[in-house]
Image: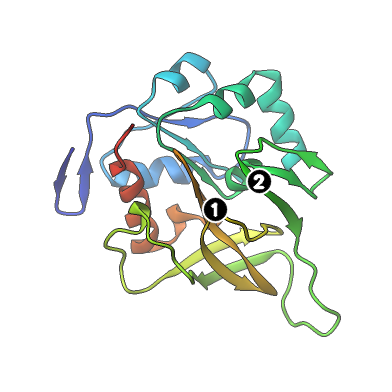
Amino acid sequence: MEVLGSTLKLSMKVVLIKYNAGNVQSVLYALARLGVEAELTDEIEKIRSADRVIFPGQGEASSAMSYLKERRLDQVIQEIKQPFLGVCLGLQLLCTHSEENDTDCLGIFPIKVKRFIPSAYSQEKVPHVGWNSLENLVKNPLFKDLPESKFMYYVHSYYAELGEHTLATTSYIHDFTALLHRDNYWAIQAHPEKSGALGEKLLENFLAIPSN
């Protein structure tokens, strides 16, 4: 790995898992800005042989899980050994269960995903859209040399509860999990590809995490 200025040069193979979710192209563009030409694929062997796997997307939980199961990608994700990053819907699908259409998910993180419910007097709307800050960061290689501003861009109606694998929180209506980490799995609810310098650094740090 070689870093020249703000551009990350990698000889590694990076794949994004294809499962008919939205917002994938913006992640590919963000990686390209780091000097990484990633491949979007649902081919099992390509995913298994990759050096880094990213699981991004916006969409609906039950239809996404159906696509994964039809192609046995659910099993592949559960068996991954290399560094793995879930983004937005990708974070939610790594949890045990989502209230969105009562969906059983992948179970990497033993926490549930629930829908935001504002109080009757709340001015906060659902979905949660816009910039919000990361709080309560736990020491982790994903957070190396982050910029001073910790604001990220969110678009979501469902959130992961707090749990033992929570790396950072964000507050909207109440506190929720902003990032997760367990073994070789990381996940982020916000959109790093839309979050400026902070999002770019988080992606760069993920790519720099050594494989076991």
Tell me where residue 111 appears, x and y as whole percent: 67, 50
Q: Which amino acid, by three-letter code, is at mark 1?
A: His
Q: How many numbered discs sit on the rendered protein?
A: 2
Residue 160 in the figure: left or right of residue 11: right
Q: Nearer the viewer, residue 161 or 10?
A: 161
Residue 165's mark?
1
> Could you say which quadrant of the image residue 50 lies in?
top left
Q: Check the picture and name the quadrant holding the C terminus.
A: top left
Q: Nearer the viewer, residue 15 or 111?
A: 111
Say above or below: 38 vs 121: above
Q: Position of residue 12 (x, y in %)?
A: 28, 29
Q: Earlier in the sequence, mark 1 or mark 2?
A: 2
Q: Residue at x 56, y 28 (%)?
A: 77
Q: For the residue carrying disc 2, how many other residues have a C-alpha within 10 Å: few (<14), some (14-19), or many (20+)? A: some
* Of the pair 161 and 194, the residue shown nearer to us: 161
Q: Please name the residue shown 48% across and 70% down the image.
A: 136
Please tell me which residue is depicted at 54% across the width and 22% down the height of the picture.
42
For this orientation, the residue located farthest to the front is 164
Q: In whole angstroms, how far apart are the C-alphas of marks 1 and 2?
A: 8 Å
Q: In which quadrant of the rendered view does residue 63 lie?
A: top right
Q: What label sits on residue 110 in the rendered view?
A: 2
190 and 111: which one is in front? 111
Secondary structure of the residue carrying tag 1 is loop
Q: Name the kind of residue labelled 2 in the image.
A: Pro
Image position of 53 (left or right of 2)? right
